[in-house]
Image (cartoon, rainbow, N blue to C red):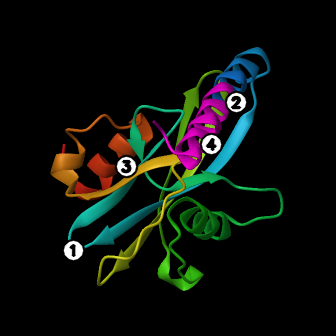
Amino acid sequence: MKKPSDLVNLFYRLLYRMAYLALKLSWMICPRNTNCAQVMLWVNGELLLVRTSYRNEFTFPGGYINVNETPVSAARRELAEEVNIEIIESNLRFEKIIEYHEYGRFVTDVFFTCKLNKYPQISIDNREIVEAIFVEPDNALMLSLHYSAKYIIEVVTSCK
């Protein structure tokens, strides 16, 4: 039998999945622009990838840039929220901006790179984020990746 905390987490994952489906529908009905920030966190030649409860693909820690928030602040906030890694903004280096259409919305993704000397302690909530792994870029490309993550890995690491 599942522990009460497992059931609560399962309930939250279900809510996230339903909310994401509702968002996708709203984007198709009322297209809009979305600005996001993502972090490519490197340790010993490996990248940190996360998988959410509402998508089947791996991607980088990241998310929406809030109103009156800079992309670098959003990247830092999302890294802390999703995997509990606190870094200072000066450790984030701008990498690339990519733009694409997804479910009727136009997405601008701002990518940052952060290199650490040792593996950080990672903590996920098992609600929004259900998996976090470090993987070499070549091996990452063999995983099920969100297309923005696949593209940026190929571009940044020249692993075409």
Q: Give the overall secondary structure of the magenta segment.
A: helix
Q: Are marks 3 and 1 in contact (CB under 8 Å)?
A: no
Expressed as whole percent of the image width and height from the top left, the position of residue 76 reads 59, 70
Q: Earlier in the sequence, mark 1 or mark 4?
A: 4
Question: How packed is label 1: few (under 14 Cα within 10 Å), some, or many (20 or more)?
Answer: few
Cα separation between marks 3 and 1: 19 Å
Cα separation between marks 1 and 4: 36 Å
Expressed as whole percent of the image width and height from the top left, the position of residue 21 reads 64, 23
Mark sitting on residue 12: none
Assign a secondary structure to mark 4. helix
Residue occupied by mark 2: 19
Residue occupied by mark 3: 152
User: Mark 2 or mark 3: which is in front?
Assistant: 2
Q: Residue at x 75, y 31 (%)?
A: 32
For badge 1, the amino acid type reads Asn
Mark sitting on residue 8: 4
Span of residues in magenta:
1-18
Q: Is residue 18 above or below residue 61?
A: above
Q: Residue at x 35, y 80 (%)?
A: 116
Expressed as whole percent of the image width and height from the top left, the position of residue 147 reads 40, 35
Q: Earlier in the sequence, mark 3 or mark 4?
A: 4
Cα separation between marks 1 and 2: 36 Å
